[in-house]
Amino acid sequence: MKTKILPKIVLMFSLVSIVFAACTTYQEPVPAATMPPQNTEIPVNPTGEVVTRELPDKFDKLTPIAPIGKEPIDMTPISPTDLPLIFQDIAEQAMTALAEKLSIQKDQIALISVQSVVWSDSSLGCPQPDMNYLMVLTDGYRVVLVVDDEAYYYHANQRGYGLLCENPNPPYSEGAVDR
């Protein structure tokens, strides 16, 4: 009886060894990196040429261009009564909000432009720190006002909610402009 069990045990042990051997991978040893001897100098500039950080003369002749999305604003004031009705309401709302903020009369405010836009989220282009906003395209308006040569931006949605924006972000897309 012992003679029948021994070949089975040897066969089983052999099969298990083959399975374990098949599961392992062979990795070739990585050759050691060769380093230069300690006292060998490594040349910084083998040609001996002096390296300078000055720009070539051809760069002096380049004309700077305006950043994309920061086009100059035409600062010619317009009258709210010259606007379509939908823009008149939003312009009046913006001028009232700015007059209250600065404690001035509305006739001291110059209306520069009213534009329908699409905002990239519900912040209306005026994100506040530590606030979360819905990431949805939001139809609205951008109004540019000027008082004493300083521009103010009023951003609103189409439902009438608006706010003066101190650090405005550009809209996702721009629609109709009524200067």
Image: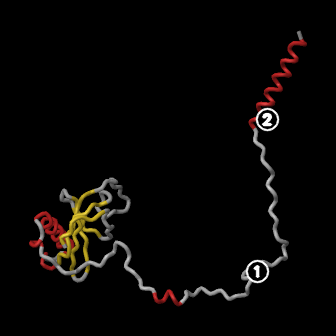
Residue 120 percent coordinates (x, y): 32, 59
Earlier-in-chain disc, 1 versus 2: 2
Circle on res. 21: 2
> Quick one: 28 or 132, which is closer to the camera?
28
Q: Is residue 4 above or below residue 143?
A: above
User: Total of numbered circles in the picture?
Assistant: 2
Q: Is 22 in front, or is 9? A: 22
Amino acid marked by disc 2? Ala
Name the disc covering residue 43, or none.
1
Q: Quadrant of the C terminus?
A: bottom left
Instruction: Kindly identify the residue that appears in the image at 37 percent across and 62 percent down.
Output: 129
Q: Is residue 33 left or right of residue 60?
A: right
Quadrant location of residue 178? bottom left
State the residue lying farthest toward the left.
81
Question: Which image quadrant is residue 8 in?
Answer: top right
**How is the model colour-coded?**
secondary structure
147 left or right of 167? left
